[in-house]
Image (spheres, rainbow, N blue to C red):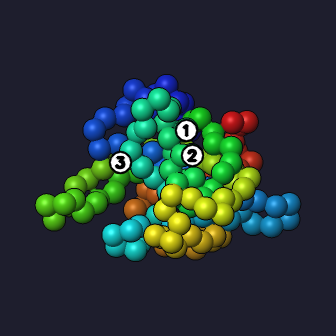
Amino acid sequence: MIPARKVAAKTREGTQYAALCYRSKPGKPVEILLITSRGTGRWIPPKGWPIEGLGPAEAAAQEAREEAGITGKVHTAALGRYKYHRLIAEAKNSSSEAFIFPLKVTGRLRNYKEKGQRKVKWFNRKTAALLVREPKLRKIIRKFDPKDLQNP
């Protein structure tokens, strides 16, 4: 886990904040929510750029609300960070990184900013890890266990 103050210190241009949205019920396996990217349709966690006035974890939670209609309790320490490539307007690949924050889902909004623009689906950890492209993100998802988290 990366404490919030260290995340803020390591944030630079090209850094985004992502939410690892999860739900768990006693006796059931943990599920991870993924969304499709608008451009390529690949499976990703909700993520976005820093938002003025919000800390990194809160920005990740805001992206989960806007992109997937998810509400919940976000943890202020990041699980880690991962690098990814994105296609920018000039058709060049650009390398970016995202810090990912666990978000325990407590609700789902009927209407949200990007409704209908993306697929939103729950997966078990193994399937979610197989669906994402980034090796470091795969590892974070596979190893994620809400029991290891301290209170948000």
Amino acid type of the residue that numbered disc 2 sits on in the rendered structure: Ala
User: How far apart, in angstroms, are the residues tagged by discs 2 and 3?
Assistant: 17 Å
Q: Can residue 110 be seen in this view?
A: yes
Residue 131 vs residue 54, the one in the foreground: 54
Q: Which quadrant of the structure image shows residue 79?
A: top right
Percent position of residue 15, x then y: 35, 43
When the figure is inspected, residue 64 is found, relative to residue 55, above or below; the finding is below
Q: Mark 1 points at which residue?
A: 58
Label 3: state its secondary structure: strand
When the figure is inspected, residue 59 is found, relative to residue 143, above or below; the finding is above
When the figure is inspected, residue 143 is found, relative to residue 12, above or below; the finding is below
**Crowding near pointer 1: few (<14 within 10 Å), some, many (20+)?**
many
Percent position of residue 137, x then y: 46, 57
Label 2: state its secondary structure: helix
**Crowding near pointer 2: few (<14 within 10 Å), some, many (20+)?**
many
Q: Mark 2 points at which residue?
A: 61
Percent position of residue 3, x then y: 54, 30
User: How far apart, in angstroms, are the residues tagged by discs 1 and 2?
Assistant: 5 Å
Amino acid type of the residue that numbered disc 1 sits on in the rendered structure: Glu
Residue 72 vs residue 29, the one in the foreground: 72
**Crowding near pointer 3: few (<14 within 10 Å), some, many (20+)?**
some
Q: Which residue is rendered at x = 42% and y = 49% of the image?
A: 48
Q: Mark 3 points at which residue?
A: 97
